[in-house]
């Protein structure tokens, strides 16, 4: 008789958070895909297209740190639920707004970014506390891969249905997720089932709390196991835990700036591809609506390589005995330098199939960052990973704000040529790789 093993409580949380990221990523790529038929219908200029595409990152930029702090004060369960409801509602109402006012559409896209920006810092805060070191790369890899799958599904589905249906479908999916989250997730489900935990230690993360405004982190107490190598008052290296941290500490350490720079560079090329690939394929490579579905292939590559990189990184650390820092640097270099060279070749290719292959290689290698600098937060700031990720993701959203109008300006000023756009992206990636290689660390600094 087959015995089915009930998923652990933490596994359910990771699964639901990954599904949320699936919806998050799908919602953000609907507009880059549908903007082609919407532009044909509403006659938007290239510059207006740039502002519409960049409106999302503006909202995303403003809510990163707010999301991390809100998770501590109000509880991760409530903040994530509120975030999904906000971004799903704005997705649903987009078809009603688009025909009437471009400015209103830009504001709606900004609210979408505001909601989605609350999501990942909350999830990272939960993961940093309740996912063990030897599984951390995989957990983040699955989270990132779920986002790539969401982008893939949206890229495959949206070109074949009316643009209005695209927004309705994925918006309603988010509302359905909110129902399941409300029913299945309770405050006492976040901790590991085999852990002995102080009840009060959960309050700052899940239900808020009335403690002071210092940047505190809930800790497990009274136990020590492979799930957490640093009981209260002690880190993996034996150093004392620093609960009270001034905000300046998040900005004055070079290892943090190494992570910030790598994340910024990764997002620059990612936003170029996410925002402009369907338009580039349609306008420069004369791709049909059916061929635009090929824009899903880079996201498929991103998902597969991301999971493989996560497992490979964990294997190098736990089985091969590689230093954590060496693994993080290896994965980050693959994730930044690989896309840089791929994009340089991509911009000189006129064949659609070869172009899609090159951008798929670029996005696939980019996924290695999930086991690189994205996993580095929990090592250099294990008690404040949600805050450091929020700061990093805030800075890394700046490329999303700039890429829309800047790409439109570069293409327009160069008489329709996209070469300057991709050369700039490759240069930013190279710079980020150099900074991370020289400044990164795997030791706790906060």
Image (cartoon, rainbow, N blue to C red):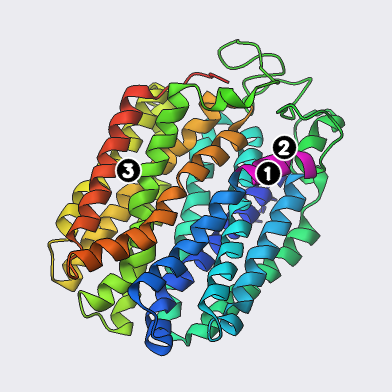
Q: Which mark is residue 27?
A: none
Residue 417 horizontal/vertical position (percent): 17, 66
Going from N to C along the chain, the mark reached first, 2 or 1, is 1
Q: Is residue 215 left or right of residue 105?
A: right
Quarter occupied by residue 101: bottom right
Q: Which residue is mark 1?
A: 10
Front-most of residues 394 and 367: 394
Q: Which residue is mark 2?
A: 192
Q: Nearer the viewer, mark 2 or mark 3?
A: 3
* Disc 1 secondary structure class: helix
Residue that appears at 32% across and 23% down: 438
- Marks 2 and 1, how far apart at CA: 6 Å
Q: Secondary structure at mark 2?
A: loop
Is residue 80 a member of the stretch shown in magenta?
no
Find out whether the residues at labels 2 and 1 contact each other: C-beta distance under 8 Å: yes
Q: Which residue is mark 3?
A: 335
Tell me which segment is drawn in magenta: 65-74
Instruction: Decide which of tag 2 and tag 3 comes sooner along the chain.
Output: 2
Can residue 310 be seen here? no
Residue 196 shown left or right of residue 127 in the figure: right
How crowded is the residue under tag 2: few (<14 C-alpha within 10 Å), some, or many (20+)?
some
- Quarter that holds the N terminus: bottom right
Q: Position of residue 343 (x, y in %)?
A: 22, 54
**Main secondary structure along the magenta-highlighted residues:** helix
* Residue 99, placed above or below residue 30: below
Q: Earlier in the sequence, mark 3 or mark 1?
A: 1
């Amino acid at each position: 008789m087959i015995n089915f093993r009930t998923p652990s409580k933490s596994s359910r949380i990771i699964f639901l958070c990954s599904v949320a990221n699936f919806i998050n990523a799908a919602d953000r790529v609907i507009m880059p895909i549908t903007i082609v038929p919407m532009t044909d219908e509403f006659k938007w200029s290239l510059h207006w297209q740039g502002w519409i595409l960049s409106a999302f990152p503006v909202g995303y930029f403003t809510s990163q740190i707010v999301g991390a702090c809100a998770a501590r004060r109000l509880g991760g369960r409530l903040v994530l639920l509120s975030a999904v409801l906000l971004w799903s509602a704005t997705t649903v109402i987009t078809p009603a707004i688009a025909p009437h006012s471009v400015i209103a559409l830009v504001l709606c896209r900004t609210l979408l970014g505001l909601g989605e920006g609350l999501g990942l810092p909350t999830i990272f805060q939960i993961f940093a506390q309740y996912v063990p070191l030897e599984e951390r790369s995989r957990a983040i890899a699955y989270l990132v891969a779920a986002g790539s799958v969401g982008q893939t599904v949206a890229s495959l589905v949206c070109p074949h249905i009316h643009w209005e249906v695209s927004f309705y479908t994925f918006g309603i999916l988010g509302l359905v997720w909110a129902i399941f989250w409300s029913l299945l997730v309770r405050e006492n489900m976040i901790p590991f089932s085999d852990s002995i935990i102080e009840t009060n230690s959960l309050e700052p993360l899940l239900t808020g709390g009335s403690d002071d405004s210092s940047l505190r982190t809930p800790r497990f107490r009274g136990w020590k196991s492979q799930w957490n190598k640093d009981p209260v008052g002690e880190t993996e290296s034996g150093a004392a835990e620093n609960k009270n941290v001034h905000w300046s500490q998040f900005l004055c350490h070079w290892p943090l700036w190494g992570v910030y720079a790598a994340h910024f560079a990764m997002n620059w090329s990612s936003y170029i591809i996410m925002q402009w690939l369907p338009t580039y394929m349609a306008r420069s490579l004369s791709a049909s609506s059916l061929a635009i579905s090929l824009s899903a292939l880079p996201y498929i590559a991103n998902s597969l390589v991301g999971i493989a990189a996560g497992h490979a990184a964990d294997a190098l650390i736990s089985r091969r005995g590689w230093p954590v820092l060496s693994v993080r640097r290896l994965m980050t270099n693959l994730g930044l330098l690989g896309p840089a060279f791929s994009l340089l070749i991509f911009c000189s290719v006129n064949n659609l199939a070869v172009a899609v292959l090159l951008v798929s290689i670029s996005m696939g290698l980019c996924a290695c960052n999930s086991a690189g600098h994205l996993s580095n937060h929990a090592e250099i700031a294990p008690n404040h990973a949600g805050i450091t990720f929020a700061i990093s993701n805030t800075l890394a959203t700046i490329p999303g704000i700039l890429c829309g109008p800047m790409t439109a300006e570069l293409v327009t000023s160069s008489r329709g040529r996209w070469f300057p756009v991709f050369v700039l992206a490759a240069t930013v990636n190279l710079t980020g790789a150099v900074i991370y290689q020289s400044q990164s660390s795997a030791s706790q600094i906060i």
